[in-house]
């Protein structure tokens, strides 16, 4: 790791290569042309999924396939398994890494949106030592994070969800494995005795320059009895910060309408998984 950090400090326009499934695609399209590539794919000790005392720890070089098929993630952090399963095809999931996807910061990618909903914290190491980036501070703009030029993401920490929680991630795309037209990740905690929402986090992808939280819907749902009318009302609220583009995959107006549809579906999916 020290050698990686030294190279980042001394090389001109360096770029870290983790799995390469995002960076190489940009380079082929001539959208990225780093002068130096630092390959960290063989760094030891950065591929793991571990249950610690108060959080799940995932090494930055953990491939998507392991995230998708991890038993603990499927049971306790299901939206991450959902999101990983939607990434490209099996070959991509065998090479791409969770840390690479987070650092690439594509707002249409699956894992950044799911990680925001999961309240993930990002541990980075650099010449100034180790620090932890909060979820609200991680994603700054399209393909831009708050990780400094001489820092490397080493671990993703996901706090354990509250008791009686469920989670889910759904994306809308033209074809299986495509980038999202709209996506939504939800984590919800319920008072199952009264069917009341105790807490909820809703993240939206591909509707702004970064994944965003759907705060208006979250605030509306908290403390309310969860029925069809309540869920529909929440999904109809304005998603502050949503500013989707119009492109070949869908217009701005279409994407804004899809926020309502997929928020409703994702909330229902998360509720169906509450134990």
Image (cartoon, rainbow, N blue to C red):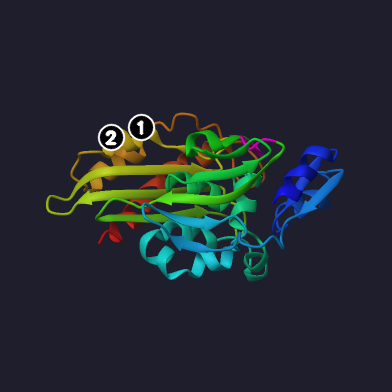
* Closest to the observer, 97 or 261: 97
* Closest to the observer, 171 or 103: 103
* Residue at (59, 55) in percent of width and height: 60
Q: Is residue 131 above or below residue 264?
A: above
Q: Which quadrant of the figure has residue 222?
A: top left
**Could one spot residue 181 in this view of the protein?**
yes
Q: How many marks?
A: 2
Q: Are marks 2 and 1 in contact (CB under 8 Å)?
A: yes
Q: Is residue 182 above or below residue 176?
A: above
The residue to which callout 2 is attached is 220
Q: Is residue 145 magenta?
A: yes
Q: Is residue 83 above or below residue 200?
A: below
The residue to which callout 1 is attached is 216
* Residue at (18, 44) in percent of width and height: 225
Q: Which quadrant of the figure has residue 230?
A: top left
Span of residues in magenta: 142-148
The span from disc 2 to disc 1 (Cα, nearest Å) is 6 Å
Where does the image place residue 76, in percent across and percent down from the top left? 36, 61
* Residue at (12, 50) in percent of width and height: 194
Q: Which mark is on residue 202? A: none
């Amino acid at each position: 790791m020290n050698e990686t950090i030294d190279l980042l400090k001394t090389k001109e326009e360096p770029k870290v290569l983790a799995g390469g499934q995002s960076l190489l695609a940009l380079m082929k399209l001539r959208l990225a042309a780093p002068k130096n590539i630092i390959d960290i794919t063989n760094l030891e000790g950065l591929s793991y999924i571990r249950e610690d005392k108060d959080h799940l720890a995932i090494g930055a070089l953990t491939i998507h396939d392991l995230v998708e098929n991890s038993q603990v993630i499927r049971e306790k952090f299901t939206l991450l398994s959902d999101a990983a399963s939607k990434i490209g095809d099996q070959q991509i999931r065998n090479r791409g890494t969770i840390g690479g996807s987070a650092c690439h910061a594509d707002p249409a990618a699956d894992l950044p949106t799911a990680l925001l909903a999961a309240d993930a914290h990002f541990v980075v190491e650099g010449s100034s030592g180790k620090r932890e980036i909060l979820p609200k501070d991680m994603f700054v703009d399209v393909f831009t994070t708050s990780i400094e030029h001489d820092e490397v993401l080493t671990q993703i920490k996901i706090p354990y969800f509250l008791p009686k929680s469920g989670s889910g991630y759904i994306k809308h795309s033209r074809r299986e494995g495509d980038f999202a037209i709209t996506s939504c990740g939800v984590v919800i905690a319920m008072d199952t005795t009264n069917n009341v929402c105790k807490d909820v986090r809703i993240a939206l992808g591909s509707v702004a320059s970064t994944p965003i939280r759907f705060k208006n819907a979250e605030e509306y749902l908290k403390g309310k009895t969860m029925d069809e009318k309540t869920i529909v009302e929440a999904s109809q609220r304005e998603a502050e910060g949503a500013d989707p583009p119009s492109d070949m995959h869908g217009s701005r107006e279409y994407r804004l309408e899809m926020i309502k549809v997929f928020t409703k579906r994702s909330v229902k999916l998360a509720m169906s998984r509450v134990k």
